[in-house]
């Protein structure tokens, strides 16, 4: 995947629909039209220029001179959607490449406010595993934009596809213990966001970026919402597929997000029950796919079938069949996923920190006994811990056992003569 493709997901922001607990945006276009006209004609700002001086030589004397060059030189488009575009640009002041997301459709107040919410959400979430926002403004055409880090690498979606295809290099780079560390980085980002009162509402492999040095970044906060705030939501549009971000209206209410990665309460449009535990379910679906290399709802494809499957189908974690390109998924991770993907939010992990602690116990070798496989691993790990805790006793015992074994072997050989 090219460097720029990481930002494509910023363009597929699902347009959320008004739910029971949301403040509705008036759909009376006669009332909204004056506001829309005013938004679409925002006063254009002069093209931004560089401000940092350059050293120039006036004969033998160096002087500091400003160049007034264009600050952000656009190098090419990274992606385009119905409401905006993302371009790659060179920042000539700081001498780095950046990604600029620009809102091209400013005729709808709901879209503008969603764009503003995304800017303020990302700006409030300063965390190593969340894409950083650098700047915001209005360009020379009167379009709102914000500047963010240019992420390099590839999406988790692309990595899962290569793992599923059995690519040896990908399996060598992402054995199970590395996948676990990647997921822990995602959980750390979401623990921070949840502590700040934000839920993402569209967590999926396409919205996670893995950099060339193992950097993990959670992207696309266009649907994020503060739990204690009243959100201004835009009208819905028809979904394109179960794997793409969309919003739709059901008999139970409005739903938003990506059907394949929704929680049951999200799939029902039950906004009153939607909190951080909904994000945790989506994360568990992501982790399940990362480990098993297939989606738990496969081969369901239509949106109605997927929404029904989200609410009724449990993941398979102990099936005897396994992906031919990798060993069986560790049993303790299967048990972890069964709890994380409980249909009832009250029976899931309640916080991202609780999930982190559970996985950290697995990393530390403190496997909870839940089946024969976990019992065996627990006994072996306890033995390893005792060896580390009592090295001298281990040496004495193993020496004695070896001596007895050798003596027995010698006696057996002599008995043959």
Image: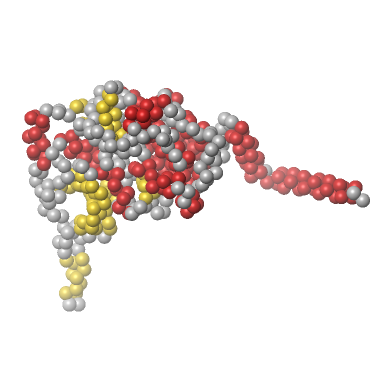
Query: Closer to the camera, 374 or 96?
Result: 374
Q: Quadrant of residue 307?
A: top left
Tell me: 415 left or right of 27: right
Residue 244 placement (x, y as % from top left): 31, 38
Q: How is the image coloured?
A: secondary structure
Q: Residue at x 81, y 49 (%)?
A: 406
| Residue 121 seen from this side | no
User: Is any atom of residue 367 visible in this view?
Assistant: yes
Name the residue at 22% across, 37% down. 114
Q: Position of residue 142 (x, y in %)?
A: 12, 47
Residue name at image x 22 percent, y 60 percent: 92
**Can you tell which quarter of the image residue 48 is in?**
bottom left
Q: How many marks?
A: 0
Residue 95: image location, x then y, percent: 26, 60
Residue 37 image offset from top left, x and y in percent: 8, 38
Query: Image height check: is 387 above or below 254?
Result: below
- Residue at the farthest right position: 417
Q: Residue at x 53, y 34 (%)?
A: 319
Query: Is residue 351 toward the left or the right of residue 382 in the image?
Result: left
Between residues 325 and 367, which one lies in front from this camera angle? 325
Residue placed most toward the observer, 222 or 96: 222
């Amino acid at each position: 995947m090219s460097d720029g493709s990481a930002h494509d997901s910023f363009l597929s922001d699902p347009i959320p629909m008004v739910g029971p607990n949301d403040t509705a945006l008036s759909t009376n276009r006669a009332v909204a039209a004056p506001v829309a006209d005013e938004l679409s004609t925002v006063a254009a700002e002069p093209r931004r220029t560089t401000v940092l001086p350059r050293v120039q030589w006036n004969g033998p004397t160096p002087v500091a001179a400003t160049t007034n060059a264009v600050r952000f030189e656009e190098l090419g488009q990274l992606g385009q959607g119905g409401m905006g575009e993302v371009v790659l640009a060179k920042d000539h002041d700081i001498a780095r490449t950046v990604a600029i997301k620009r809102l091209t459709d400013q005729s709808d107040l709901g879209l503008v406010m969603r764009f503003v919410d995304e800017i303020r959400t990302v700006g409030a979430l300063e965390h190593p595993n969340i894409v950083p926002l650098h700047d915001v403004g209005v360009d020379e055409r009167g379009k709102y934009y914000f500047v963010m880090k240019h992420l390099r690498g590839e999406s988790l979606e692309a990595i899962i596809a290569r793992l599923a295809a059995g690519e040896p290099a990908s399996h060598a780079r992402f054995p199970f213990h590395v996948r676990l560390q990647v997921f822990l980085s995602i959980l750390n980002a979401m623990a921070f966001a949840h502590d700040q009162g934000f839920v993402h509402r569209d967590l999926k492999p396409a919205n996670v970026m893995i950099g060339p040095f193992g950097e993990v970044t959670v992207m696309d906060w266009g649907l994020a919402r503060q739990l204690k705030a009243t959100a201004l939501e835009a009208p819905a549009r028809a979904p394109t597929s179960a794997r793409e971000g969309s919003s739709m209206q059901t008999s139970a209410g409005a739903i938003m997000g990506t059907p394949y990665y929704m929680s049951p309460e999200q799939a029902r449009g039950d906004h009153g029950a939607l909190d951080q535990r909904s994000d945790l379910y989506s994360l568990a679906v992501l982790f399940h796919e990362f480990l098993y290399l297939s989606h738990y709802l496969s081969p369901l494809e239509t949106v109605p079938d997927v929404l029904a499957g989200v609410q009724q189908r449990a993941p398979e974690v102990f099936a005897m069949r396994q992906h031919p390109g990798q060993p069986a998924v560790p049993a303790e991770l299967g048990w972890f996923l069964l709890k994380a993907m409980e249909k009832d939010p009250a029976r899931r992990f309640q916080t991202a920190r609780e999930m982190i602690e559970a996985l950290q116990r697995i990393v530390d070798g403190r496997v909870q006994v839940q089946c024969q496989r976990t019992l065996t691993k627990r006994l072996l790990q306890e033995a390893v811990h005792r060896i580390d805790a009592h090295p001298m006793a281990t040496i004495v015992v193993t020496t004695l056992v070896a001596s007895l074994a050798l003596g027995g072997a010698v006696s057996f050989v002599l008995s043959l003569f």
